[in-house]
Structures are given as C-alpha cells and as structure tokens.
Amino acid sequence: MAQSVIGALRVNLGLDSAQFERGAKRTQKPIQNMRRQFLAVSAAAAAMGTALSLAVRSGLQDVDRVAKAARTIDGTTGALRALELAA
C-alpha cells in the first residue's frame, strides 16, 4: 500500500512540475516585453528630467542676471523690468 501511495505522489509531482515549466516558458516573452517598455519609459523620464533641470537652471540664471543688473543701478528688479518693457 505504501508503494502505491509513493508512486501516485511521484506521478502527481511530476505532472505539477511539468505544468510549472510550461507556464514559466510562456511568461518569459511577456516579461521581456515589459522590461523593454520599462527601459523606454525610464529613458524618456530621465531625458525629461534633464531638460527640466536645464530649463530651471537657465531661468534662475536670468533671475540672477536681472538682480545683479538692478543692484548696479541702485534699483529694484521691478524698476529694471519696467525699464526693459519701456524700452
């Protein structure tokens, strides 16, 4: 009796492992596609972050330039902006 139980267990485990291997092979391609898509999205996000940081830096440099120019004429940035608009 013990022999038949062990034999049935071997057959059952063998079938379960075969199904697992087939399922694992079927999931490889979708996982590769998902990885490729993730890499594309992360590259786009990195490029966008770089562009955004460059734009912010350029804006801050303009603010610094205006503030320094206003100090040289002993005025405020608002007054300098008014002069720029009037010109």
Image (cartoon, grey):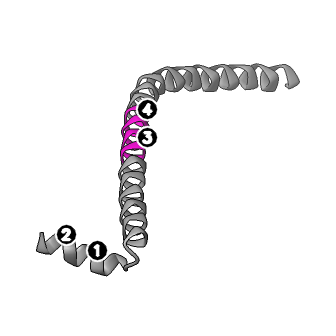
First-in-chain label (3 vs 1):
3
Residue 80 disc label: 1
First-in-chain label (4 vs 3):
4
Residue 39 disc label: 4
Residue tagged by mark 2?
84
Please identify, in this view, whether the residue under mark 2 or under mark 4 is nearer the observer.
2
Are circles 1 and 2 on residues that touch, CB within 8 Å? yes
Residue 71, given in percent of the width and then of the height, sits at 43, 71
Q: Closer to the camera, 21 or 65?
A: 65
What is the spatial separation of the Cα atoms under label 2 and label 4, in whole angstroms?
46 Å
Please identify, in this view, whether the residue under mark 3 or under mark 1 is nearer the observer.
1
Residue at (58, 19) in percent of width and height: 18
What is the spatial separation of the Cα atoms under label 1 and label 4, in whole angstroms?
47 Å
Q: Is residue 25 left or right of residue 2?
A: left
Residue 10, given in percent of the width and then of the height, sits at 74, 20
Residue tagged by mark 3?
46
Which amino acid does the dot numbered 2 rest on?
A: Glu
What is the spatial separation of the Cα atoms under label 1 and label 2, in whole angstroms?
6 Å
**Is label 3 in a helix, a strand or a loop?**
helix
Does residue 42 sit above or below 74 in this rendering?
above
Residue 37 part of the magenta segment? no
User: Which range of residues does the magenta coloring cover?
Assistant: 38-51
Does residue 81 sit above or below 55 in this rendering?
below
Which amino acid does the dot numbered 4 rest on?
A: Leu
Please identify, in this view, whether the residue under mark 3 or under mark 2 is nearer the observer.
2
